[in-house]
Amino acid sequence: MVLEKAGEPLRLTELAVPTPGPTQVLVDVHACAVCRTDLHVVDGELTQPKLPLIPGHEIVGTVAHVGEGVERFRIGERVGVPWLGWTCSRCCYCRNDQENLCDRAQFTGYTLDGGYAAYTVADQRFCFPIPDSYSNAEAAPLLCAGLIGYRSLRKAGSGKRLGIYGFGAAAHILTQVAKYQQREIYAFTRAGDVEAKKFALDLGAAWAGDSNEMPPVELDAAIIFAPIGALVPQALKAVRKGGVVVCAGIHMSEIPSFPYSILWQERSICSVANLTRTDGEEFMALAPCIPVRTEVTIFSLEEANSALIRLRTGRIQGAAVLVTNPKKS
Ligand SMILES: [Zn+2]
Ligand SMILES: [Zn+2]
């Protein structure tokens, strides 16, 4: 499925099988999860996509062919391809364990073609092995909702009481990780979204309420996954002195001005950008130990536009996943 112009639906296009470069693997795609970032790309809120573009950056498939310099993977092995697709290894960020901020980074499904397709190519250095205990469709959301959720959790510090604003794919994974770490989750959903609240409580959240409500206790930290700037002051009011508010999305509507008093007392606001390979390795090792279970709604590849529409209107519980062959999912 191809994006030709922002704001238009993806087009079903007959695509040639790409040829892997010297350090690339050719991936026979089995599943690709649908991320909110894909919506931001398709809607034109992220303004620098390669066009035409195959979106999708939570890819699970098997290696079908390898470039001559590939030594990490063999033909037939199962791999995951995440959002971070290439870095320069040379800039000051790359040299200081901050490759997520690389000046020349390339991103799967944004500046590189992604996984809404039967085949894709990926640089072997940025692919991860997939734990055996997951099916293709179940593993796909781990690759962004999981990885970037995990990075956000680390940014939130080690406090016990954690608020999560926006209870979608990342939140449903993170709740399981946080519970494993013996923390309490306070889930904030769209006003009146009874199903999302029930979903959060079923996963073990200590409390679930509307995003404009105050939680029953002061929070140590809050993570905002919903792309809504007005949640920043809301979350600041909910965290204790010294608490942190983590903005985990790539795009957010404008943050309204707010009184300094809700930031004072050493509260802080930070953002999370992309992932490092270390985040990925740590999380992919941790997920099967907990074990993190993902709830997925399956769509065929051709149904990508309807999956995006359902994500936009908040009608997906857990994660939406496109599969190329339902028998292999
Ligand atoms: Zn993503
Ligand atoms: Zn770099």
Image (cartoon, grey):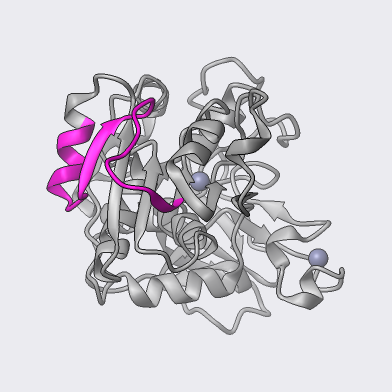
Q: Is residue 268 magenta?
A: no
The part of the image, by quadrant, that contains residue 41 is top right
**Residue at point 60%, 15% (across, down):** 7
> Does residue 2 appear in this view?
no
Labels in figure, total: 0
Write the start and end of the magenta stretch as one range: 196-221
Is residue 84 positioned above or below 9 on the image?
A: below
- Residue extending farthest to the bottom is 71
Depth check, front residue: 100 or 265: 265
Depth check, front residue: 304 or 21: 304
Q: Quadrant of ligand 2?
A: bottom right
> Does residue 130 appear in this view?
yes
| Whole-percent x, y for residue 54 in the image | 57, 37
Q: Is residue 209 magenta?
A: yes
| Whole-percent x, y for residue 63 in the image | 46, 67
Image check: 96 left or right of 194?
Answer: right
Image check: 172 left or right of 256?
Answer: left
Image check: 321 left or right of 135?
Answer: right
| Whole-percent x, y for residue 9 in the image | 52, 17
Is residue 153 positioned above or below 115 on the image?
A: below
Is residue 82 positioned above or below 250 on the image?
A: below
| Whole-percent x, y for residue 249 in the image | 55, 41
- Residue extending farthest to the right is 91
**Residue at point 74%, 59% (across, down):** 101
**Residue at point 58%, 15% (across, down):** 8
Image check: 65 left or right of 30?
Answer: right
- Residue extending farthest to the top is 8
Depth check, front residue: 277 or 262: 262
